[in-house]
Image (cartoon, rainbow, N blue to C red):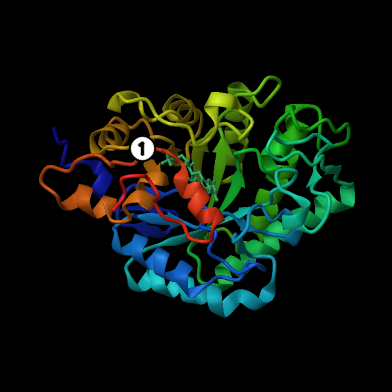
Amino acid sequence: MQTKPSLLFEPTRIQGLKLNNRLVRSATWEGMCAEDGRPTPALGELYRTLAEGGVGLIVSGFAFVAAEGRPLPGALGLHRDDFTSELRALTTAVHRAGGVLCAQLGHAGGQTRANLCGGTPLAPSAVAAAQYQPETPREMSGAEIQRTISAFADAARRAREGGFDAVQLHAAHGYLINQFLSPHTNRRDDDYGGSLENRSRFLLDIYRAVRAALGDDYPILVKLTGADHLPEGLSEQDALRIAQALDALGVDAIEVSSGTPASGEQTPLRRPPDEADKQAYNLALARAVKAAVGCPVMVVGGIRCLESAAAIIDERQADYVSLSRPLIREPGLVRRWRDDAQPFASDCTSCNRCFKAALKGRLECLKVDAS
Ligand SMILES: Cc1cc2nc3c(=O)[nH]c(=O)nc-3n(C[C@H](O)[C@H](O)[C@H](O)COP(=O)(O)O)c2cc1C
């Protein structure tokens, strides 16, 4: 069964930014940068392939805004001023192929290790983020909070100077901004902890600083956790109020994900159910965000077939559909969905072996039967 034509493939805009369709490559850490975060030609090739594959918007992998926020080996760095020519090579490769590239700005907070971030990881409170990250982080001082807010603004400026078309703040998946939002990891009793208003302050201060650095016309997106799925974690109701606060400040789009690596079965990278109409595992959260805000809403997580993607858009459940693992398996998936008469679903099985590939320095599908 096919559902074409669909609004999915109609050109659209975020702010003034023209996009060829409503499909997004969700941020995906590639593991392909040098140890210091400098982009490599191989990463430019990967982005070029994605752009040629027809996806409307490519969000880069997690780009760390400060050395102490480095999340994983081979992650992109936007913490230094001397990467501009390599950043330009990335953005030029995408633009020449007709694509649009957004930089995801992040800070790992407590969800990293000393051997990656150069010392004891920093976090809102001294609470270990997940079992697989056993190091207990150190509570950030007020000065460190202010310095980190400025680091986001500086990184955003570098992204724009490098030719990126937009930035996205990473406020999901248990990383630093999510740690501030969540009562599970934020036990502070100053202006940045306690009430929802205080827990949201770090994200909103970053948004304001980035907006001030980039101006009103530059698209700023946020990838927001719709819920932590953790006891005493961020609730759906709180996440909705955060989405509304961002919307009131003028955010250009919110991408809804959920969970952290500590969320048991409900991690951000879970396996979707077999039934196509139940696969979009963050859709209920995204629908709730869409009902609460005026800005465009993206939904990510488990979407594997054109019918579901088209239904999400055509029924106005969300404004954009984001994909990560299916585009690792098949970077030309969007073009195939657009052009084939009988487009079959992605055969990504969400086995997450791609994560291990990125750990070894090259993002690729390692599904056992992959050719
Ligand atoms: C190898 C790998 C790396 C990822 N890196 C990031 C990242 O850097 N930033 C982010 O927000 N999400 C990251 N994700 C999560 C994806 O963006 C997405 O939210 C998740 O995989 C669910 O979508 P999917 O079912 O389409 O894969 C990563 C996922 C994978 C598989």
The yes-or-no answer for disc 1 within 8 Å of ligand 1 is no
Q: Secondary structure at mark 1?
A: loop
Q: Residue at x 50, y 71 (%)?
A: 163
* Drawn side of residue 273 relative to residue 258, left or right: left
Q: Residue at x 44, y 24 (%)?
A: 284
Residue at image mark 1: 349
* Residue 247 appears in the rendering: no
User: Where does residue 193 sit, x and y in percent of width and height?
Assistant: 81, 33
Does 153 sit above or below residue 136? below
* Drawn side of residue 237 relative to residue 275, left or right: right
> Crowding near pointer 1: few (<14 within 10 Å), some, many (20+)?
some
User: Where does residue 342 sit, x and y in percent of width and height?
Assistant: 12, 42
User: Where does residue 299 sit, x and y in percent of width and height?
Assistant: 43, 37
Q: Quadrant of the N terminus?
A: top left
* Drawn side of residue 295 relative to residue 115, left or right: left
* Residue 230 appears in the rendering: yes
Q: How many marks?
A: 1
For the view shown, which residue lies furthest in the front direction?
A: 368
- Quarter residue 230 falls in: top right
- Depth check: give the residue in front, 243 or 274: 274
- Quarter residue 70 falls in: bottom right
Q: Residue at x 61, y 34 (%)?
A: 260
For the view shown, which residue lies furthest in the top direction?
A: 231
For the view shown, which residue lies furthest in the left direction?
A: 341
Tag 1: residue type? Answer: Thr
